[in-house]
Image (cartoon, grey):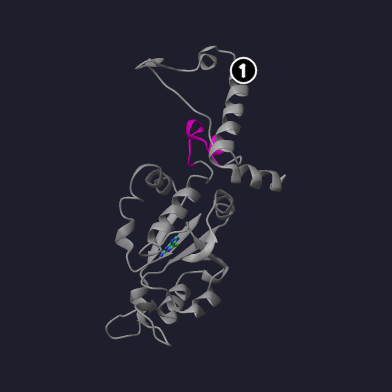
């Protein structure tokens, strides 16, 4: 899969993309990540990409032209799936991550400043938000998308790391897990996990998953029954 990120701050991504699983996924060719700095496409002599909002208001907003020109510079940009990061977008979820992971090429546009010229929406397929809070820009959201999508690509996670048991993958939170020691400061690992009875363990884990989801995220249970 190819991911192209449009940003005026490509250095923000160093570290996140050069360690651990994202590093390995790129090294083995499961994902190819490229950056386009749309400041390079500003026609302004000071390379500005922002300007005042018509009608007034505080702060600067992103102009449409540099984004459009940057998009057009990407090979086969018209067939790629184009995502704009914005707090006004569709709330990101595991389901959306699963959908994105099936695409050949996604382009993620990171806004900054107080917003963007609304005409940018004519050149994107989807607006995505990563939650109901405000960030300084879309870059951290783009990292969230790249991370959550890359781990779903074939061959990225080993069988020990597999995502089929993830929280959210089956619409439930994960069951509790324990490792050695069997007893720590008087707190014991549940007996059933030490029993060696796989059917009993499976049953206990399913019950605990449900119990935890009911207590902490009843909204997930509701969503799950709506999807059935
Ligand atoms: Cl994608 N961008 C910004 N600036 N703030 C956000 C967001 C994105 N998602 C949630 N808050």
In the rendered image, the residue lying farthest to the left is 46
Query: Is residue 157 inside the magenta stretch?
Result: yes
Image height of 220 relative to 78, above or below: above
**Residue 218 showing in the rendered view:** yes
Image height of 56 relative to 96, above or below: below
Image height of 44 relative to 195, above or below: below
Quarter of the image where the C terminus is located: top right
Q: Which residue is mark 1?
A: 200
**Figure quadrant of residue 52:** bottom left
For the image shown, how many numbered marks are present on the structure? 1
Q: Residue at x 38, y 57 (%)?
A: 140
Classify residue 68 as left or right of residue 215.
left
Mark 1: C-beta under 8 Å from nearest atom of ligand 1: no
Region in magenta? 156-168
Q: Residues within 10 Å of mark 1 (few under 14, many from 20)?
A: few
In the rendered image, the residue lying farthest to the right is 228
Classify residue 190 as left or right of residue 39.
right
Classify residue 152 as left or right of residue 111.
right
Image height of 1 relative to 45, above or below: above
Q: Residue at x 37, y 67 (%)?
A: 7
Q: Secondary structure at mark 1?
A: helix
**Residue 110 horizontal/vertical position (percent):** 41, 66
Query: Is residue 173 inside the magenta stretch?
Result: no
**Residue 199 horizontal/vertical position (percent):** 63, 18
In the rendered image, the residue lying farthest to the top is 195
The front one of 197 and 44 is 197
Q: Quadrant of ligand 1?
A: bottom left
**Residue 171 horizontal/vertical position (percent):** 60, 42
Q: Residue at x 49, y 78 (%)?
A: 118
The front one of 40 and 28 is 40
**Residue 84 showing in the rendered view:** no
**Residue 120 horizontal/vertical position (percent):** 49, 77
């Amino acid at each position: 899969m190819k991911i192209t990120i449009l940003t005026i701050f490509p250095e923000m991504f160093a570290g996140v993309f050069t360690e651990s699983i994202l590093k390995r996924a790129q090294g083995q060719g499961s994902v190819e990540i490229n950056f386009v700095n749309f400041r390079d496409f500003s026609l302004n002599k000071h390379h500005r990409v922002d300007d005042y909002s018509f009608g007034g208001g505080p702060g600067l907003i992103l102009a449409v032209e540099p984004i459009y020109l940057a998009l057009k510079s990407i090979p086969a940009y018209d067939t790629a799936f184009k995502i704009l990061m914005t707090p006004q977008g569709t709330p990101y979820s595991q389901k959306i991550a699963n959908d994105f992971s099936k695409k050949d090429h996604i382009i993620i546009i990171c806004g900054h400043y107080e917003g963007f010229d609304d005409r940018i929406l004519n050149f994107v397929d989807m607006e995505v938000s990563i939650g109901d809070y405000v960030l300084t820009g879309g870059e951290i959201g783009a990292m969230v998308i790249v991370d959550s999508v890359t781990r779903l690509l074939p061959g990225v996670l080993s069988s020990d790391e597999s995502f089929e048991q993830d929280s959210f993958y089956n619409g439930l939170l994960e069951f509790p897990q324990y490792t050695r020691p069997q007893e720590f400061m008087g707190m014991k690992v549940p007996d059933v996990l030490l029993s060696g009875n796989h059917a009993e363990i499976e049953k206990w884990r399913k019950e605990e998953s449900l119990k935890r989801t009911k207590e902490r995220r009843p909204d997930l249970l509701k969503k799950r029954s709506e999807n059935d």
